[in-house]
Image (cartoon, helix red, strand yellow):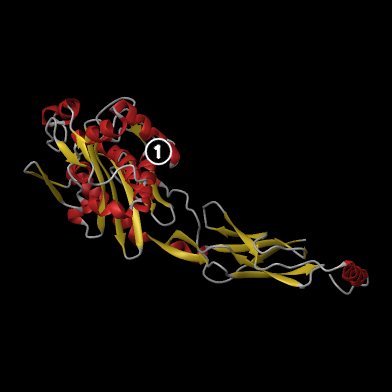
Amino acid sequence: MKFNQLLSGVLISSLLGSVSASALETKARNAILMDYDTGAYLYAKEAEKMVPPASMSKLMTIYVLFSKLKDGSLSLDDTFTVSENAWRKGGAASGGSTMFLKIGEQVRVEDLIKGILIQSGNDACIVVAENISGSEEDFVNEMTKYAHKIGLKNSSFANATGLPHPDHRMSVEDLAILSRHIIKEFPEYYSVFSEKSFTHNNIKQGNRNPLLYSMSDADGLKTGHTEEAGFSLTASAKRGNRRLIEVMTGMSSNKERSDEAGKLMSWGFREFNNYEVLTAGQKIATLPVWFGQENQVDLVVGETVFRTVKKNKASKIKMTAEYDKPVKAPIKKGDQLGIVKIAVPNQPVIEVPLFAAKDVAPIGIFGRFLENLKYLLGGKH
């Protein structure tokens, strides 16, 4: 028989759907605000639309490079050679952002990382692409492979730089997901994103991320700007134990980009919080057991569950446990025997599995006969 049990206590949400764009106004053409820990979308505006990412797509280039460092196929002390192609397409004469590399120069991988993340060097990206894959075209295939691996669904790449191309597109949702992977998978390199300047070939350039200068909690990731994309930004900030990631495109100026990014980030920290909904090992219910050497078994939560919810909605959350009882032995520890449904107003219901806390062995034939007899006589239900 199916039983529902309304659970008491502070009950908080699970995965949020995106908040309606009308909840907050922004001048950004596309925008998303994500909680890093839970992956919840606190705000979304045209978040799945594929748009020109400009230099924000250098995050995909750096993800490939970081992956090569992590698997040991590259080291920070390795050197890459600057080709004439990289110098011509990405150097100062091209008119885009550059690291001011020289033809034939041998550059350490660590310096190229800084040239990409701090100086947004197009030449540095092409050098990385050519030295890893042989050509920028082949490196694009690497970018695509890694994008699919981490679940990016609305991205297509035509180069390693983000320079304008009709086939080079990403959604702000994909950029947020990519940023989350970078922070989670490569913490040893993430501090580079917050460095405010880097000097190469005696040319000092500052980090273009405006939040590094206007918001003390901000610590990365990447700006972008082309005429088509407008002023754009992928950014992250950490306040206490909470980290948020935002992506915005289509602002009309650097000031507007800074203002809108700061407004959205501050709103997210102010309006939302993360709560521990369930704790690993927490007992939710005790079920009677038929034909078992023990007559009951506890249902427990398998892992600690944190969720993000708007602060003024926390008191309106409902959580219900569903399970069949009694349950028949044998039972193995870890068998799923029920679920907890977590309901947030105006959001999808989320189900969390409940597991048996221990093994319960079956009784023998004679014991089963006695149990059946008790049942028939009305002594056990």
The answer to which of 46 and 133 lies nearer the viewer is 133
Q: Residue furthest left?
A: 202
Say which element carries label 1.
Answer: helix
The answer to which of 316 and 121 lies nearer the viewer is 121
Instruction: Give the percent coordinates (x, y) of residue 245.
Output: 34, 51
Q: Residue furthest bottom?
A: 379
Dot 1 alpha-carbon crowd within 10 angstroms: few under 14, some 14 to 19, many 20 or more: some
Residue of label 1: 146
Residue 289 appears anywhere in the view? yes
Q: Residue at x 16, y 52 (%)?
A: 196
Name the image quarter holding residue 101: top left
Q: Is residue 221 above or below residue 292?
A: above
Instruction: Give the percent coordinates (x, y) of residue 296.
Output: 74, 72
Name the image quarter holding residue 368: bottom right
Instruction: Give the percent coordinates (x, y) of residue 185.
Output: 37, 51
Where does the C terminus fall, quadrant-wise? bottom right
Q: Determine whether, in the image, residue 211 is placed left or right of residue 103.
A: right
